[in-house]
Amino acid sequence: MAKSYVKFEVPTEVVAKTYEALQLAKQSGAVKKGANEVTKSIERGLASFVVVAGDVDPEEVVMHIPMLCEQKGIAYSFVPSKLDLGKSIGMTVPCTAIAVENQGSANGAIRDIVSKISGVAPKPQTAPKEEKREAKQEKPKK
């Protein structure tokens, strides 16, 4: 049974590439792991790519993360296993979510993953900051 927070199915080859990209990002960049750290990274605007495990129980732990990513315009993806997600960054325990803050040498791989899932994933909404900038430019100066 698919979880309610998993919004799209990710192809197997993209999942494998995601694990490799996360391993590269961990070695040469910076990642945050766990639902709480990922949520903070998204809200602060530091995350550039987020990966959520598809087998988290209870679902409520991570079901807010895709919605936050859409609001902030951050690319996100899903992988089927939290155990494999943890292993991809060198942990011996399962991991529910990972946020990549500094891509390091994984930049090209992450860009490729995002381009492959962008046809599958729902388009992110425009960030509210852009709308505020446009409104400020229209006001006449005193």
Image: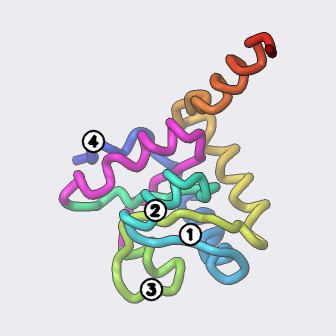
Q: Is the Cβ of the residue at disc 2 closer than 8 Å to that at disc 3?
A: no
Disc with the residue nearer the chain's start (4 vs 1): 4
Q: Which residue is mark 2?
A: 38
The kind of residue on which mark 4 rests is Ser
Residue name at image x 27 percent, y 41 percent: 4
Q: Is the Cβ of the residue at disc 4 closer than 8 Å to that at disc 1?
A: no
Disc with the residue nearer the chain's start (2 vs 4): 4
The kind of residue on which mark 2 rests is Val
Left or right side of 107 for 120:
left
The kind of residue on which mark 3 rests is Met
Q: Secondary structure at mark 3?
A: loop
Gap in angstroms between the C-alphas marked 3 and 1: 13 Å
Left or right side of 48 for 120:
left
The kind of residue on which mark 1 rests is Tyr
Gap in angstroms between the C-alphas marked 2 and 4: 19 Å
Give the magenta range: 58-82
From what the image shows, is residue 31 above or below residue 107? below
Q: Is the Cβ of the residue at disc 2 closer than 8 Å to that at disc 4?
A: no
Q: Position of residue 104 (x, y in %)?
A: 75, 72
Q: Which residue is mark 1?
A: 19
Q: Secondary structure at mark 4?
A: loop
Q: Position of residue 69 (x, y in %)?
A: 50, 44
Left or right side of 136 for 22:
left
Disc with the residue nearer the chain's start (1 vs 2): 1
Place residue 62 in its image quadrant.
Answer: bottom left
Indicate which label's residue lies in the foreground, 2 or 3: 2
Residue name at image x 80 percent, y 14 percent: 142
